[in-house]
Amino acid sequence: MINFEFHNPTKVVFGKKSESQVGQLIKSFNGNKVLIHYGGNYLFENGVMDAITTSITQEGLEYILFGGVVPNPRLELAKEGVELAKREKVDFILAVGGGSAIDSAKAIAYGLVNDFDLEDLFMAKVTTSNIAPIGCISTIAATGSETSNSTVVTLEYNGEVLKRSYNHDCARPLFAIMNPELTFSVPPYQSASGGADIMFHTMERYFSNTEDVKLTDKIGEAILQTVYQEVPKVLTNPNNYEARANLMWAGSLSHNGLTGTGRASDFPVHKISHELSAMYDVTHGASLTAVWGTWSRYVLNNHINKFAQLAVNVFGIDPNFEDLKETALNGIVAWETWCKDIGMPTSLSELGVNPTDKEIEEMANHAVMTGGGTIGKFFKPLSQKDVVNIFNLAM
Amino acid sequence: MINFEFHNPTKVVFGKKSESQVGQLIKSFNGNKVLIHYGGNYLFENGVMDAITTSITQEGLEYILFGGVVPNPRLELAKEGVELAKREKVDFILAVGGGSAIDSAKAIAYGLVNDFDLEDLFMAKVTTSNIAPIGCISTIAATGSETSNSTVVTLEYNGEVLKRSYNHDCARPLFAIMNPELTFSVPPYQSASGGADIMFHTMERYFSNTEDVKLTDKIGEAILQTVYQEVPKVLTNPNNYEARANLMWAGSLSHNGLTGTGRASDFPVHKISHELSAMYDVTHGASLTAVWGTWSRYVLNNHINKFAQLAVNVFGIDPNFEDLKETALNGIVAWETWCKDIGMPTSLSELGVNPTDKEIEEMANHAVMTGGGTIGKFFKPLSQKDVVNIFNLAM
């Protein structure tokens, strides 16, 4: 186990009707004028936005609405939000939606109190520990951005479309309101893709070189088992409160840092998949499942025991101690079967993309850029060439 | 699953030599003059106190020392601490030690910024959400007080010795420094007792009437498995860093609220055992193991499935679906065997106490007092008569 810090001050308010507490919560964190940032107009149709603005008004606070968030949120929109927030003298940012709305709101909150260009933040040219006060109401079980320290945006830089993140503890929202009922209306594909996203926030940390992090491993397996068991239930019955609730809480715990305590990781599968989202605007969770099976077989020989542990403890495979590689492979196959059952792709063609060699080269270049030419350095280091191979094998 | 709030803002700094960051941490939380509160003089012999005071002095901060904490810490000492802290114009309380030092420091921190008598706080006559800034350096894997919201003290009230708690989120320390190396010197009995304490913070929440908290259950089982597997390792090799580290992190996660998310509990076994500690000054963890086997058999028939789940998922018992009660009982027996192996008592006589009927009546009266005559109301409600029965059966 390696030394670590764990600091997760977000106040979680979880359960039925919890969105009605939003005004009170903003007030407790000294907010006066609120920018409500969101994506889907469904929030006006299902009464949720009405409940939110009523709660805010009842506390004597002001608000303005700023919509327009799309999946893989664009930095351009966040920059518009910064201008609006400055003009309107907003002092609190409230995100309502999934990871895209929350990350876009985090980007606005960075822009509101810092003078640098936001591009510079996401292209790793500047750093900051300053952010405007932010809270959120989560409406999907997925990224866990409601308690995480990360902000992921899509931006154009030197004529290229890139998906980039900035991670700092200051970006953990002051509060996260999580009502599983708000996720009942999430369509099947997004529900499954959100489940995959939760799974990979744990998986990316689980596959680490760090030895002897038994408790962290077991907690990770608890979350992975939960996703594996609960996603099919919400596809069968979208209004299954308990399954939605278990998934929603799993989403936060998977990415609030808990599943990484005591070990190193650098999210190689995310880095590969982010390039698919940037180039083809595909759903994040689906871009992860489209490459994980290929990645896992590519790196398997260096880490047979860990893949066998996953197979036995999460996917319920009987261990074959004579041939742990078989056990490990059976686990990957079980995972692929699960993906098919919940409608998630396990190849690029199932994802609906068919990159040319030139596009694969370009995506591989971008993928390894942030790692100085190598990703996966805390597990199985992958060069640009390896990433090209993985894309080709994943076709 | 029931609605819940989860707010755990304590900054955890975990790992080797982490105590050398204490000055920096206190400064980051605006401390200037620090009361260092502790128990054992071993801290001066092993160099730990020197590292702490050096770090504090290097940051230009002042400190005064205030020792004398004993297990089952006395409110009288905390009141002396309040007077000293006021006289010396202290603005930050640093606890160094185990749960007793941390809880005593929390009591001082309450006293420093509130005008009421501390007895009134612990006898539930007043409440507060104010506490002076507090940080801690934990030296044992046990209570988890380093990140918990609870404060437990022993006090004399109307001529009787009582062990009482006050729980409020304001009492979560601003930071918790956790260096597993500092726990190498914890003697075997205290190591085992600390492990039992960790186990029971999860077990008390695990046995709840609330249905369908699958993720919370699985995380609880992850912690219970860790305690079950790691305690024997630290008894065999006290300097096993990895085992000490897994146990230490389990101690925090077991009692920071995580294992209770989404369900109700009121800690009946703690309430029974606290009376043993109050009357006989026995070690907390040992007082819990001395009664749990009896309590579990006493309440088993109402909750056979949950006890069977514990037996299978934590103690590795093969399930007998024809007779789940047998499975459940085998789990209790496996737990008792583990207790014997690690030197923990499973009866009052093994704990070394032999209460009279009058003493049992008195302890049972006190135990149910805080619950308005009933404890365990979220699982199997127990009256004063039930508690008398449990004490007698546990002899």
Image (tube, coloured by chain):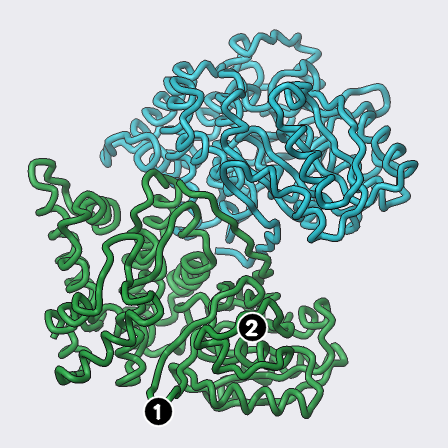
Chain colours: A green, B cyan
Residue bearing the label numbered 1 = A159
Q: Mark 2: give few (<14), some (14-19) or many (20+) Cα within 10 Å.
A: many
- Upstream in sequence: badge 2 or badge 1: 2
The answer to whether residue B127 is left or right of residue A311 is right
**Front residue of B302 and A216:** A216
State the image coordinates of residue A93 (x, y, percent, origin top left).
61, 78
State the image coordinates of residue B299 (x, y, percent, origin top left).
47, 30
Task: Please tell me the numbered disc located at residue B389.
Answer: none
At mark 1, the secondary structure is loop
Label 2 resides on the chain identified as A
- Residue A225 visible? The answer is yes
Distance from label 2 to label 1 (Cα)? 32 Å
**Front residue of B265 and A224:** A224
Q: In this view, does B280 lie above or below B385?
A: above
Q: In the picture, residue A48 is in which quadrant?
A: bottom right
Q: In the picture, residue B239 is in which quadrant?
A: top left
Q: Is residue A152 above or below residue A50?
A: above
**Front residue of B96 and A373:** A373
Q: What residue type is labelled 2?
A: Cys
Q: Image quadrant for the C terminus of chain A?
A: bottom left
Residue bearing the label numbered 2 = A136
Question: Which residue shows up at 48% across the image and 27% down it?
Answer: B195
**Front residue of A246 and A363:** A363
Question: Which residue shows up at 53% across the image and 88% down it?
Answer: A79
Q: Mark 1: give few (<14), some (14-19) or many (20+) Cα within 10 Å.
A: few
Q: Image quadrant for the N terminus of chain A?
A: top left
